[in-house]
Image (spheres, grey):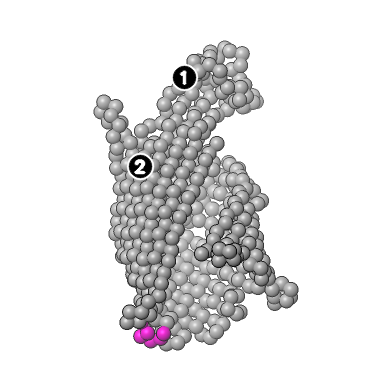
């Protein structure tokens, strides 16, 4: 069994004041704790003697492991910002400055035992169901070997500090320009335990540190009340998470595979260009069409590793660069144009088409089979649909659907001229989710509250992996349900 806990505390506030002009000061803080406890994760494999014999657990030959894991995360973040009205061209012009600091810490511990039986193979129950094999009454019948290594446990820390300014100007009535600059300082450290001389346990640190200045600019031009055009340019980044960055191996939580982090990963720099046309039927309903382009330096991809075992091994690497471009059609529309009785129903969604290309490093070209290809993990077509019911009693019910096209998940590797396997493709499942929100007010507390029920993955559809058009893996992730209560004071 697995135990997961998440505690989140947020505090936000703000006030208006006058100092040379109208001002708004906002502040906030968040403290979060997350814990995962897996006291005894048992894994084993079945073997067979021939193509016609059944798969069974063979004592002393099949591998049986017991895995104990515990992860503790803590997050503390603070932010401040101040917006000042500066009516240079219009009453809406403003200048906003702000600061953010964030710190996340993780403590991960893992112990894995490899278990063998002392009973000779000549025993009459060499073959048996797994429940008969692992139910021992005498501990002396078992041998335990420590399979985990010191580096499988680690302490990690992530720090981010940011300063920014943002301004909005309306030089002429139909034109609105927003521009800004963000300065970010990021430091990520992972301390893995190691065995030094004399079996003394020490630590080895891997670090990723960088500072960036990130500009952004956007323009909106309103032709009239119904039609407007948006243009935008921005720069941002993504960075490897702790698991991707640590030089340790873990079992993938969804499908059977060993995944190893890569401490040589660096951040991915991204430049974005967007153009969007929007048509408004009224204040809320609209349809839009967007074109977008992204230029990526050092994109992080999943990659396959060579292995002599039966379980596949994966890791991560930075490719040299990648480009992607595409378009998106989105809409949000009440259905009262069909009938007045449908005024409470809203049909919304979007369709996205993406084309991408990646450039590999010379070292990757020597080891990866497919040289010219799309970005790994990216579906070329994605559709999202939602039907929402809203009534005057503050009830909101949404039924949503998501479907992604087949996508490349792992690229086959080669050793010289010898090709080791084929590319892995994933056919994602059809996803249907339900969200039901009941809003109400508690007069005695003068508090607005909301009760939210969520049911995810109602279809529990299959995820299918293929190689060369043949199915290699089929799995389901299961349905999930949640109930939450929130209040605004």
Q: Is residue 351 left or right of residue 68?
A: right
Q: Residue at x 31, y 44 (%)?
A: 206
Question: Can you say whether 443 is above or below 406 in the image?
Answer: below
305 and 92: which is toward the camera: 92
Q: Residue at x 29, y 39 (%)?
A: 204
Question: Can you say whether 368 is above or below 440 in the image?
Answer: above
Q: Residues within 10 Å of mark 2 (few under 14, many from 20)?
A: many
Identify the residue under disc 1.
143
Predominant secondary structure in magenta? loop
Identify the residue under disc 2.
155
Q: Is residue 336 left or right of residue 374?
A: right
Rounded to the nearest angstrom, the CA distance separating label 2 from label 1 is 30 Å
Horizontal and vertical percent for residue 201? 30, 31
Q: Which mark is residue 69?
A: none
Q: Which residues are magenta?
A: 86-91
Quick check: can you spot residue 116? yes
Question: Can you say whether 423 is above or below 214 in the image?
Answer: above
Q: Are marks 2 and 1 in contact (CB under 8 Å)?
A: no
- Residue 275 inside the magenta-drawn segment: no
* Quadrant assignment, res 415: top left
């Amino acid at each position: 069994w697995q135990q997961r806990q998440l505690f989140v505390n947020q505090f936000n506030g703000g006030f208006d004041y006058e100092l040379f002009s109208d001002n708004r000061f906002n502040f906030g803080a968040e403290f979060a704790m997350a814990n995962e406890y897996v006291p005894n994760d048992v894994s084993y494999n079945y073997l067979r003697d021939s193509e016609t014999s059944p798969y069974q657990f063979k004592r002393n030959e099949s591998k049986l492991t017991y895995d104990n894991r515990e992860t503790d995360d803590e997050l503390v973040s603070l932010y401040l910002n101040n917006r000042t009205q500066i009516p240079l061209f219009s009453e809406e012009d403003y200048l906003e400055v702000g600061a953010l600091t964030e710190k996340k810490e993780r403590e991960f511990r893992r112990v894995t035992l490899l278990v063998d039986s002392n009973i000779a193979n000549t025993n009459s129950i060499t073959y048996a169901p797994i429940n008969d094999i692992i139910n021992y009454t005498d501990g002396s019948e078992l041998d335990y070997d420590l399979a985990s290594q010191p580096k499988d446990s680690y302490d990690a820390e992530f720090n981010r500090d940011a300063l920014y300014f943002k301004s909005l100007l309306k030089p002429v009535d139909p034109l609105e320009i927003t521009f800004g600059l963000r300065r970010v300082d990021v430091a990520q450290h992972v301390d893995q335990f190691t065995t030094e001389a004399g079996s003394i346990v020490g630590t080895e640190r891997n670090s990723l540190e960088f500072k960036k200045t990130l500009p952004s600019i956007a323009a909106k031009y309103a032709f009239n009340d119904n039609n407007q055009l948006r243009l935008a340019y921005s720069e941002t980044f993504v960075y490897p998470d702790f698991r991707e960055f640590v030089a340790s191996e873990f079992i993938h939580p969804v499908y059977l595979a060993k995944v190893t982090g890569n401490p040589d990963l660096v951040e991915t720099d991204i430049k974005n260009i967007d153009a969007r046309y929007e048509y408004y039927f009224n204040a809320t309903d609209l349809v839009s069409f967007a074109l977008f382009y992204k230029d990526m330096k050092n994109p992080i991809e999943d990659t396959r590793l060579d292995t002599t075992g039966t379980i596949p091994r994966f890791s991560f690497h930075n490719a040299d660069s990648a480009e992607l471009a595409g378009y998106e059609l989105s809409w949000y529309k009440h259905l009262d144009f069909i009938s007045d009785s449908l005024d409470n129903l809203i049909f919304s969604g979007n369709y996205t088409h993406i084309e991408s290309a990646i450039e590999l490093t010379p070292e990757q070209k020597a080891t990866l089979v497919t040289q010219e290809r799309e970005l790994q993990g990216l579906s070329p077509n994605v559709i999202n649909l939602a039907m929402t019911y809203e009534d005057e009693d503050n009830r909101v019910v949404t039924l949503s659907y998501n479907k992604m096209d087949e996508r490349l998940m792992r690229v086959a590797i080669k050793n010289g001229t010898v090709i080791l396997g084929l590319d892995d493709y994933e056919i994602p499942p059809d996803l249907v989710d339900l969200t039901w929100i009941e809003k109400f007010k508690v007069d005695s507390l003068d508090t607005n509250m909301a009760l939210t029920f969520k049911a995810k993955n109602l279809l529990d559809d299959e995820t299918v992996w293929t190689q060369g058009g043949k199915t290699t893996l089929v799995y389901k992730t299961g349905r999930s349900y949640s109930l939450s209560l929130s209040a605004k004071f």
